[in-house]
Image (cartoon, rainbow, N blue to C red):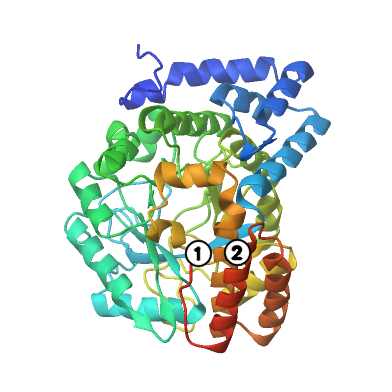
């Protein structure tokens, strides 16, 4: 029997089944324990200090009690605190990105993904470097600055050399005023040597979804292929960190296994990264299982409704207060709007989940990994965010200034976001408004920029940001940053 140890490098010890089951039993026994819940909520609340805000976060056991809680007024309090934490550390900024699917060749047998090897009728496609360039130009013409590249696992068709070549191509394309300034990578678990190569290629965050932390279910859902190895997959983030990548992104695919089990495992993984590497996950994503080519979500019996989904999001924000939280176009406009208030800090916009497709006028469906629920254009998403009071941010400055890993976390924890990320968000929003926005979006956007400039605490920073925005509007000068 494996013993729970968050500092261990063995998957069965830092994601320990017995510990999760004991945690769920404890949470169930205390789900209506108002006194305990109040103590946990008080611990989660952000505290104002002379140097900014401090937030203790929650253990996986404390957070699981909140997730199990059934007292309506306590749940509302949970949501209120989640919003306070989001505003204290990230303000009203929402980072925008787009996925770029490079290839759907895959040797795995994952039962929830249409790219699985047994699917013989889905067209298999792999972008050439010329096609990558065309996709990047199309994304730049939309206004995107940050991409998350995706590819199936196939050592013959998608070797690491292909991924590295694609990254080089993406960074090389400069079209009009467009640049992709940061490439995040979502590819299969790999070796320390390959993670080192990705780091040297200048990637931002390495993202890998666990899919499920329940080992027995994991093995059943991944019956064939290299992804079948639960331990190798679960220990990937430690190899990435060893390879020099200090920004990693976690996530599970909600709907594959019971959500309370997944939630506990996810928070335990975050605790493990903090315990071993001194820095938790840079991002946590919250995808839900969606319909795809030969995948029917109704075949899986662990789906979660919108209210439960909102509660999970809020509890993650309370448990891991400093992490960026991502929601994709898998979700509808209404669901995304609600979750933005509860802790989400990054969204995709104008996304296509097929291999290629951005360069085509009509959205292709034949190679999509999942149905896109929010099919609005990037311009519509940007305007929508602003109308709700959020600043759409295309900022990538922290990556390029070396503020990653623990350096980013110290910036976040010290409250310097308002003097750094806030003006950077306004600068990149101004670029978008000037180069890509519709007249209606421009009108809403520049009113927001003027209003938000006044919130920058440091007078010198405020003055420089104001001057830089003037230069963006009156010249072709771009890429100002703090």
Hey, which residue is sitting farthest top in the picture? 1
Determine whether 98 is above or below 311 in the image.
Answer: below
Residue 195 position within the rendered picture, expressed as x and y whole percent measured from the top left = 25, 48
Residue 236 position within the rendered picture, expressed as x and y whole percent measured from the top left = 31, 39
Residue 174 or 349: which is nearer the viewer? 174
Residue 243 position within the rendered picture, expressed as x and y whole percent measured from the top left = 25, 43
Residue 311 lies in what quarter of the image? top right
- Label 2, residues with CA under 10 Å away: few <14, some 14-19, many ≥20: few
The residue located at (75%, 23%) in the rendering is 38
Hey, which residue is sitting farthest right in the picture? 73
Residue 213 position within the rendered picture, expressed as x and y whole percent measured from the top left = 43, 32
Determine whether 248 is above or below 232 in the image.
Answer: below
Residue 103 numbered mark, or none: none
Determine whether 465 is above or below 268 in the image.
Answer: below
Q: For the residues carrying marks 2 and 1, which lies nearer the camera in this image?
A: 2
Residue under numbered circle 2: 460
The residue located at (30%, 49%) in the rendering is 188
- The tag earlier along the polypeptide, 2 or 1, is 1
Residue 57 or 222: which is nearer the viewer? 57
Hey, which residue is sitting farthest front in the picture? 460
Residue under numbered circle 1: 395
Spatial separation of the CA atoms under disc 2 and disc 1? 20 Å
Residue 407 or 463: which is nearer the viewer? 463
The residue located at (36%, 20%) in the rendering is 13
Task: Please say whether residue 270 is visible from this viewpoint.
Answer: yes
Residue 299 or 417: which is nearer the viewer? 417
């Amino acid at each position: 029997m494996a013993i729970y140890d968050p500092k261990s490098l063995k998957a069965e010890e830092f994601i320990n089944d017995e510990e999760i089951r004991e945690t769920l039993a404890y949470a169930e026994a205390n789900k209506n324990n108002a006194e305990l819940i109040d103590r946990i909520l008080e611990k989660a609340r952000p505290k104002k200090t002379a140097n900014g805000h401090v937030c203790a976060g929650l253990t996986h056991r404390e957070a699981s009690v909140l997730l199990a809680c059934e007292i309506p007024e306590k749940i509302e309090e949970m949501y209120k605190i989640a919003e306070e934490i989001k505003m204290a550390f990230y303000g009203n900024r929402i980072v925008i990105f787009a996925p770029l699917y490079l290839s759907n060749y895959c040797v795995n047998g994952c039962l929830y993904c249409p790219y699985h090897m047994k699917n013989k009728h889905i067209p298999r496609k792999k972008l050439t470097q010329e096609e990558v360039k065309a996709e990047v130009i199309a994304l730049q013409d939309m206004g995107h600055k940050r991409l998350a590249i995706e590819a199936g696992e196939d050592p013959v068709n998608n070797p690491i050399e292909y991924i590295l070549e694609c990254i080089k191509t993406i960074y090389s394309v400069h079209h009009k005023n467009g640049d992709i300034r940061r490439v995040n990578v979502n590819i299969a678990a790999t070796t320390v040597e390959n993670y080192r190569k990705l780091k040297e290629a200048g990637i931002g965050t390495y993202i890998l979804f666990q899919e499920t932390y329940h080992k027995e279910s994991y093995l059943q859902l991944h019956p064939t292929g290299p992804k079948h190895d639960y331990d190798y997959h679960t220990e990937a983030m430690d190899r990435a960190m060893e390879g020099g990548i200090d920004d990693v992104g976690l996530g599970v695919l909600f709907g594959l296994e019971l959500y309370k089990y997944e939630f506990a495992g996810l928070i335990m993984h975050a605790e493990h990264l903090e315990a071993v590497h001194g820095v938790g996950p840079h991002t946590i994503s919250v995808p839900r299982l969606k319909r795809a080519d030969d995948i029917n979500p109704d075949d899986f019996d662990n789906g979660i409704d919108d209210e439960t989904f909102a509660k999970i999001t809020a509890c993650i924000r309370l448990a891991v207060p400093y992490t960026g939280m991502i929601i994709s176009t898998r979700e509808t406009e209404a669901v995304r709007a609600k979750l933005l208030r509860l802790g989400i800090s990054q969204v995709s916009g104008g996304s296509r989940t097929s291999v290629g497709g951005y360069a085509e006028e009509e959205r292709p469906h034949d190679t999509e990994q999942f149905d896109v629920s929010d099919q609005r254009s990037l311009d519509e998403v940007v305007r929508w965010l602003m109308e709700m009071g959020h600043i759409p941010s295309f900022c990538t400055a922290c990556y390029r200034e070396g503020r990653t890993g623990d350096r980013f976390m110290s910036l976040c924890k010290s409250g310097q976001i308002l003097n750094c990320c806030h003006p950077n968000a306004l600068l990149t929003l101004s670029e978008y408004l000037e180069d890509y926005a519709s007249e209606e979006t421009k009108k809403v956007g520049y009113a927001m920029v003027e209003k938000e400039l006044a919130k920058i605490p440091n007078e010198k920073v405020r003055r420089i940001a104001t001057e830089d925005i003037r230069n963006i509007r009156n010249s072709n000068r771009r890429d100002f940053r703090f």
